[in-house]
Amino acid sequence: MSEAFRPAHYGTNAARIIRDEPTMRTAVTEATRSKDERRQAAWAEIDADAWRDWARDLKTHVLTHLADYLEEAEDRLIENGVHVHWAETAEDACRTVTRIADGRGVRRVVKAKSMLTEEVGLNAHLEAGGLEVRETDLGEFIIQLLDEPPSHIVGPSLHRSLDDCRRLFHERFGTPPDATPETLAATARRVLRDDFLRADMGVSGANFLAADTGTLALIENEGNIRISTSVPPVHVALVGIEKLVPTFEDLSGMIQLTARSATGQPIGNYTSLIQGPRRPGERDGPEEVHVVLVDNGRSRLLADDHAWETLRCVRCGSCLNICPVYRQTGGHAYGWAYSGPIGAILAPGLLGLEESMPLPYASSLCGACAEVCPVRIPIPELLVYWRERAAEEGLAPRTETAAMKAWATLAEHPGAFGAAAEAIRVLPRGKAGRALPVLRGWVEERAAPEPSGERFLDTWNRREDR
Amino acid sequence: MSPRNRILGHVRAATATRPEAPHPGRFDGTYATDDDRTPVERFSDLFTTSGGEIERFEDVEAAARWLARYADDYDGVTVGATVPTALRPALPSTCPDLAPLGVTLAAAAIAETGSLVLDARDGRRTQLLAPTHVVFVKARDIHSTLVDALSDLRGDLPSAIGLHSGPSKSADIGQILVRGVHGPGRIVAAILGEHPDELRGGRHG
């Protein structure tokens, strides 16, 4: 990952992807359309509105009483024999994992897919410490080989075509250049099976943490999460503090709604419910389980009276799948682990607004994301909220600031306003749009807006029925 | 102050003035209220839709006869700790990472999601590492909904539960679906029907 992988470079990165990697746009658009169709079909089988209300209310309840639930979860985890750690920052989270690894003499780590570990940059940290880190989710495995960040919350490699994968596996593992997907998957299975059996530690995230039983819930389809959390002698789970649900039974609704939204399934083919390390009488399972509760900006976001609702997010990727802006580029343009509409409102919350610019502007505000969010996060409203904050803090794009200033000046001076309006009217027909600086890009591919031949007031005054 | 207390302090301060938001109550997800299928039928339909296979047997003897034939295609097996003697195939016992076949007993199943409930006490490697997985489940242990199953399980939780609802699969290579990526590519739910009391060995025996 290069220095250019930052939100600040959104514009240049998006332009580069669209210009230089046209197949990526096709791959992303096709994959997200199909994911969204599957979500629609899965929602049609349920009373989706009622489920979404329930999920919104549950997460709002948890976030309103979060400290109490965190303490309850900690008590249960400790009773279950789990080591509990707290990390205030990304750096703290990474150092905690390193400390656990050092304590056990760990050399080889297998990783289940976890967006939180992407957020805190865990792999780079562990590798810098001399550990061998292997991503085991097939999509994560592919992008790790390519040295790329994930392009999508759920499908990290969905920007890569079958041909991209064939080339990669041919170079790395000597598979035939025209290998079938089955052959490629079998190759990955063979390579990774060996890693699972040799690993000293498995690292995962968690979709949910049930406070009253201390249960970690993880959803997947490949089985790599179950194996990563079952076979190595140590399991470390990084859990964002917003992942709590009050009860074991509450997992039922959250697991099903997340699966239906993310992949259109009633449930993932594998769901893990983990209570702790191997118990007396069990033949296998990890000897040690550690849970690292990570803040990294979440408590600050929780304190924001508008944007706290962002923390309801279950990372299903529905808003990415439907977003017409995300579909053009995939996730890499956003320059951060989380992309698409949710990334654009999480970034200012977790990274700070200045570091996140211009992501709140990477949207046409079409509103589709709000229609598909299973926990009803008002994403478009929050995009506007962060834009307002950017304007207040002098971070808004210069063109927007200049245009708003010019408009304000005109609106406050009726003489100048009239003169400007007259100027637009007298320009030759069809050229008016092209003469306007902001509209030029728009009208290059479309019919320019036609100015009326007369003032609105004159039209009004001529009406016969007034 | 410890990181723990600082985080909890920040969280408490952040939510101090938030309006009260009550818990919405037990999840009532029964979406197909006019569904006249039995739990066994609903489970079977969803399990096959997601790529799993279903076998049904009236009693343990019938299941054992089927298993003897099924095992003919394999040269070794790893068997779960709770599988009763009658349902252990006559094959050499192999360690789970080398076994071509895994045979386990589910603690329960869920009609609503088409899931088998696999208990760590049966052996996690046995449930995960063989390319083919045969899971016995008693018809009377099939719950209607996930929330019912969780309520039933909470009193006696093992270190881990796996809800297995189909074969291992992935579409990460060019969005094309492939099976058997890490876990078993074939999974058979063998449902023991009318005379479940004949199943000896006990749930965790």
Image: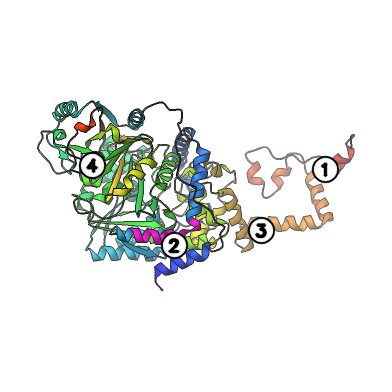
Do the residues marked 2 and 4 share a common chain? no
Task: Say which label, 3 or 2, has the lower sequence index.
Answer: 2
Mark 2 vs mark 1: in front: 2
Residue at figure coordinates x 50%, y 36% from the top left: A47
> Marks 3/1: CA distance?
27 Å
On-image quarter of the C terminus of chain A: top right
Mark 3 vs mark 4: in front: 4
- Residue A174 placement: quadrant: top left
| In the rendered image, the vertical position of residue A1 relative to residue A316, given as above or below | below
| In the rendered image, the vertical position of residue A101 relative to residue B103, given as above or below | below
> Marks 3/2: CA distance?
31 Å
Q: Which residue is mark 1?
A: A456
On-image quarter of the N terminus of chain A: bottom left
**Secondary structure under the numbered disc 1 in the rendered image:** helix
Q: Which residue is mark 3?
A: A401
- Identity, as a three-letter code, of the amino acid under mark 4: Gln
Task: Say which label, 2 or 1, has the lower sequence index.
Answer: 2
Do the residues marked 2 and 1 share a common chain? yes
Label 1 chain ID = A
Task: Say which label, 3 or 1, has the lower sequence index.
Answer: 3
- Residue A79 placement: quadrant: bottom left
Horizontal and vertical percent position of residue A244? 42, 54
Do the residues marked 1 and 4 share a common chain? no
Q: Which residue is mark 2?
A: A296
Specify start and end residues of the magenta stretch as a single range. Answer: A63-76
Do the residues marked 3 and 2 share a common chain? yes
Mark drawn on residue A238: none
Q: Nearer the viewer, residue A234 or B193?
A: B193
